[in-house]
Image: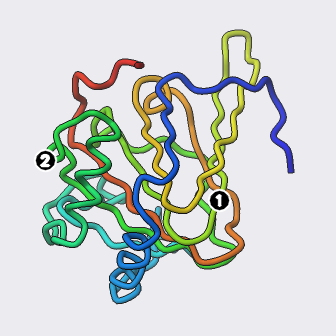
Amino acid sequence: MAMRGVVEQPSGLQYAEDLISEAEEAALLERLAQLEVTPLVMHGVPSRRRTAHFGVGYDFDTRSTSEVAPIPEYLLALRAAAARFSDVDPRSFVEALVSFYPPGATISWHKDVRAFGGVVVGVSLGSPCVMRFQRTAAGGERRVFEQPLAPRSAYALTGAARWTWQHSIPAVRADRWSVTFRQLGRTTAESPR
């Protein structure tokens, strides 16, 4: 189903295919399949998407962050690749959110919470999907954009893409994993590139 509105690419959205190799993806998928992932619960409602937080966790009820298990060693090379792609220090990515999407799982319209910083990088593994973006322009006109996310690809949200635009993922058709790296607090990397 096509989105309605004026098509506009969000300022601060970067995308790259083949951030990692097929062999690296296969090794990661094997490790992730062994993870204990639990339904993400927002406002008391569990989602179909299942997650595991590393480094920093976030509680949607208390709207607070907490220290959780450290980022596993097998994700550090992926974190380094995400940092090179987004031109930040890999150590600034203090959170790794691993998400599993079984067929039919979605993410509704949202912006990542303000507790996290100005650069968010997501890496897609497994099946492809589409990330949708929307914002309301001056005069109330809806602006929209769709970014296909191929397996092994990465996207970075900075500037307006991070702070102004909402994003969502419609129902996936096959098993999909993602690893999202976030910083804590607002940073100087917030301005659009």
Q: Are marks 2 and 1 in contact (CB under 8 Å)?
A: no
Residue toward you, 43 or 89 = 89
Q: Residues within 10 Å of mark 1 (few under 14, many from 20)?
A: many
Q: Position of residue 21 (x, y in %)?
A: 42, 63
Amino acid on which disc 1 is placed: Cys
Residue 147's tag is none
To which residue does mark 1 refer? 129
Residue 2 higher or lower than 173, as above or below: above
Residue lying at the far top of the rendered structure: 139
To which residue does mark 2 refer? 91
* Residue shown at the point (15%, 72%) measured from the top left: 69
Q: Secondary structure at mark 1?
A: strand
Q: Position of residue 68 (x, y in %)?
A: 16, 68
* Residue shown at the point (79%, 23%) measured from the top left: 6
- The reply, left or right, for residue 60 in relation to residue 165 is left
Q: Secondary structure at mark 2?
A: helix
Residue toward you, 110 or 95 = 95
The disc, 2 or 1, on the residue closer to the chain's N-terminal end is: 2
* Residue shown at the point (73%, 17%) measured from the top left: 140
Q: Position of residue 93 (x, y in %)?
A: 21, 48
- The reply, left or right, for residue 31 in relation to residue 149 is left
* Residue shown at the point (40%, 30%) measured from the top left: 158
Amino acid on which disc 2 is placed: Arg
Residue lying at the far bottom of the rendered structure: 34
Residue 193 higher or lower than 168, as above or below: above
Identify the image quadrant of residue 65. Answer: bottom left
